[in-house]
Image (tube, grey):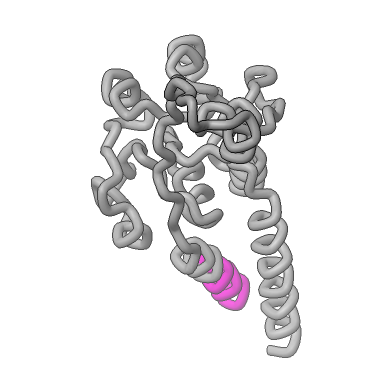
Amino acid sequence: MVKMQKGFAILAVMMLVAFVAAGCGGNRQEAASTSQPPQSEAETPSSQSSQPSEAQNTENQDVRVVRHAMGDTKVKGTPEKVVTLFQGATDAALLLGVKPVGAVESWIEQPWYNYIRDKMEGVTNLGSENQPNLEEIVALKPDLIIASKTRHEEIYSQLSAIAPTVMTEEVHLWKDSLHLTAEALNKQDEEEKFLAEWADKIADFQEKWETN
């Protein structure tokens, strides 16, 4: 019994270390200009075509359909201004290298758990996971919201009116949260790399457990 408890404790520590080690990043994307300067007499059609406007670049971004607990949501390109409305989504975003612009506070160790606190500088506190501050979310002008059906089903339409919103079925299945977050953020390569490293750590742990 003591040996089994020791094993669970080691596994829990490994999961915590994996999230703490995850980098955070993601620069905020500047809003694309929707207007183009008038063509001067000196400009030629060839010079215009070789330098497309930011608006044209935005329009050309791939639009992906992400299937989630509430249906299908179209997500454009690689979102950078991300709002996370449950702890698993916050952890997953950080692990994938994306710092949210806004996140709900932790249940304890508020506003953020100690293991991610150094990665959350400048992130807007959106209040309780059960009742996030919608006015703050609107003010952040996110390009993606990650939420959970068990927490936010009743406000799904309001969230979707603010930004493309995807929802996990519930909040406790970390691999499901990671997978949906990676798909929505267009970070599948980072997800695959982490899961491969995680599998190696589990195999190493099992080998050590069997030899003890």
User: At 47% across and 53% down in the image, what residue appears?
Assistant: 94
Picture coordinates of residue 49, whole percent (x, y): 63, 33
Side of 109 relative to 39 (left or right): left
User: At 73% across and 66% down in the image, what residue appears?
Assistant: 196
Picture coordinates of residue 10, whole percent (x, y): 55, 73
Side of 137 relative to 73 (left or right): left
Segment tinted magenta in the rendering: 1-12
User: At 72% across and 76% down in the image, what residue appears?
Assistant: 206
Residue with the most extreme bottom position: 211
Which of 159/127 is in front? 159
Vertical relation: 205 (above or below) 198: below
Which of 123/77 is in front? 77
Is residue 174 rendered magenta in the image?
no
User: At 43% across and 43% down in the image, what residue appears?
Assistant: 87
Picture coordinates of residue 39, whole percent (x, y): 48, 23
- Evaluate whether residue 141 shows in this view: yes
Vertical relation: 123 (above or below) 198: above
Picture coordinates of residue 9, whole percent (x, y): 52, 70
